[in-house]
Image (cartoon, rainbow, N blue to C red):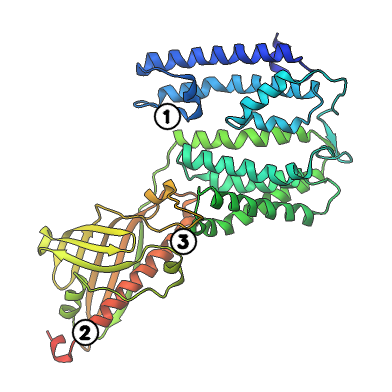
Amino acid sequence: MTQLLFSPRGTINRSLFLFSGIALFLLKYALDFLIVRILLDQVWWPWNYLYFPWQVMEGTLAAPFLMILLAIPFIWIGSVLTLKRLRSAALSPYLLSLFFVPGVNLLLFLYLSLKPPTEQSTPPSTFTRESPAISPKLPHLVRLFFVPLLSFLLVWFATEQLQNYGWGLFIGLPFMIGFLSMLLTPPDSPFSKGFKNTLLALALTALLLLLLMIEGIICILMAAPLALLLAWLGALLLYLLRNSYRSWNQGRIFSCSLLLLPFLMVIEVFFPRTPSLIKVQSQLEIEASPLTVWSNVIQFPELPPPTEWMFKLGIAYPLHATIEGTGTNAIRKCNFSTGTFLEPIIIWDEPNLLRFTVISNPPPMREFALGHVHPPHLENFLQSQAGEFKLIQLPGNRTRLEGTTWYVHNLWPEKYWQLWSDQIIHTIHLRVLNAIRKNAESIPTHSNRE
C-alpha cells in the first residue's frame, strides 16, 4: 500500500485509480468537514472547494491553515496516482500539470478512469543531456501555451484568491516563466531560441490577463522591466544547468517547479509584511509672498487638462481643491480624476505650514483592458497617509513652496514599486505646485506685499 500511494514508480489500472480517487476525496472531505465544524461551527460543502478556504469562512485563519496543511499529503498521493495512471495509459507525464488546475483536474480524473488499457509504455522520466527534454509527441500548441496558461492561473490564484501581491507573484512567477520556457525547449537549441520562447510566454501571459480582465495595461507595463529581467535569469539558469550536467532528472525538476511557487504564494499570506511609510517631497520657488501663496494652497480652482503621459494612461491626477472651515477644524477636499481625498487639517500655521491626514483615498488609477477591470491592488496601492504644504519666505518677496506626501503601498518587492510610486507622486506634486505658482503669480504685485 505504501508503494502504491507514495512511490511515483510503476503503473495503476483504471479501476484501482477510480476507487482510490473517490476514497481519498471522501476521506479529505470528512476531515475538512470536522475541522470547519469544530473550529468555526460552520458547514463545509463539497462545492466550497471551488473557492479558497478563507474566502468562505469567517473568523480565525486556523481552520483554513489546517486544511491547507492537511492537503499536502493528499496532493502528493493524488500526484503519484495520476502520474502512474498516465504512465499506464501511455500519455505524456506533463499532463500531470492539469492535476493542479481546479475543474480541469476533475475532467482529467474522469478521462483517466474511463480510458481503456493500452499495451504502449512511456519512456522513463529520467532524461540525459542527449535526450529530449520533452516528448516529441507533445503537440506544438501544448508546448506554446502551457507556460502562459499556467502563468495566468497563478496570477489569478495570487491576486483574486489570495489577494497577495508579493514576492511569489513579482519575483517567483517571471523567474518560473523563463525556467519552464527553457525547459520545454529542445536541449540542443541555442540560448536565443529558449529566450525567444520565454518572451513569447510573457507576451501571451500578458495578453490573457488583458483579454480575461484580470489586470490592466498600466500595471502590466510597470511590471514588465522586472519580469523581463527575472525571466531572463530563469532561462539562463536552466540553460546553464542543462549544459553542466550530463544526466539529471528533468521530470523531477519540472514537477518541483510547478509545486513550489503556489506553495510559496500561500505561505506569504500567513507571514504578512508591514509596509514602510514612504516620504516624497517636491518644491519650487514662486514670485509671490507666502500670504498670497497660502490662499492658493488651501484651495485652488479647476486645473487644465493634463499633458503628462502617465495621466493620459490612466494614473489619477488632481482636478481642484476646496476647503470647509478654518484652523484644525477644517477639512480639505482634493478632487482627483478617480475620486476625492478627504484631508482633515491637523496643523494650520498661516502662512507657514498646512499639514493634514488622509482618511479617504480614491483609486490611484483607472486600469484599461478590453472591458471593466478593477484588480484588488487598486485598493491598497498608493495609500496616502498624510501630507503638508510648507511655505518658506525668501528674499525679494519670494516663496519656496514644499509639498510632501507620506504614503504606503502593499506591492513587493517594495523598492522596485517605490520607483514607480515615488515618480507618480512627484508628478502629482508638480501639477499642483505649478498650478499654485501660476495662480499666485497672476495676482497683481501690490497684492503680494505682506
Q: Does residue 180 appear left or right of residue 401 in this picture?
A: right
The residue identified by callout 3 is 420
Tag 1: amino acid? Trp
The residue identified by callout 2 is 288
Residue 301 against residue 99 in the figure, above or below? below
Give residue 253's quadrant in the image: top right
Q: Position of residue 247 (x, y in %)?
A: 85, 36
Give residue 317's quadrant in the image: bottom left
Residue 62 against residue 187 in the figure, above or below? above
Tag 2: amino acid? Ala
Residue depicted at 65% across the width and 35% down the height: 258
- Spatial separation of the CA atoms under disc 3 and disc 1: 32 Å
Q: Of 47 and 325, which appears nearest the observer?
A: 47
Label 2 near label 1: C-beta < 8 Å?
A: no
Residue 419 against residue 103 in the figure, above or below? below
Secondary structure of the residue carrying tag 2 is loop
Q: Of 138 and 68, which appears nearest the observer?
A: 138
Q: Position of residue 223 (x, y in %)?
A: 54, 56
The residue identified by callout 1 is 54
Whether residue 394 is visible: no
Identify the mark nearer the N-term, 3 or 2.
2
Identify the mark nearer the N-term, 1 or 2.
1
Neighbor class of circle 2 (other Cα within 10 Å; few <14, some 14-19, many 20+) is many
Residue 8 disc label = none
Whether residue 320 is visible: yes
Residue depicted at 76% across the width and 52% down the height: 194
Q: Position of residue 229 (x, y in %)?
A: 63, 56
Identify the mark nearer the N-term, 3 or 1.
1
Q: Position of residue 437 (x, y in %)?
A: 27, 80
Secondary structure of the residue carrying tag 3 is helix
Neighbor class of circle 3 (other Cα within 10 Å; few <14, some 14-19, many 20+) is few
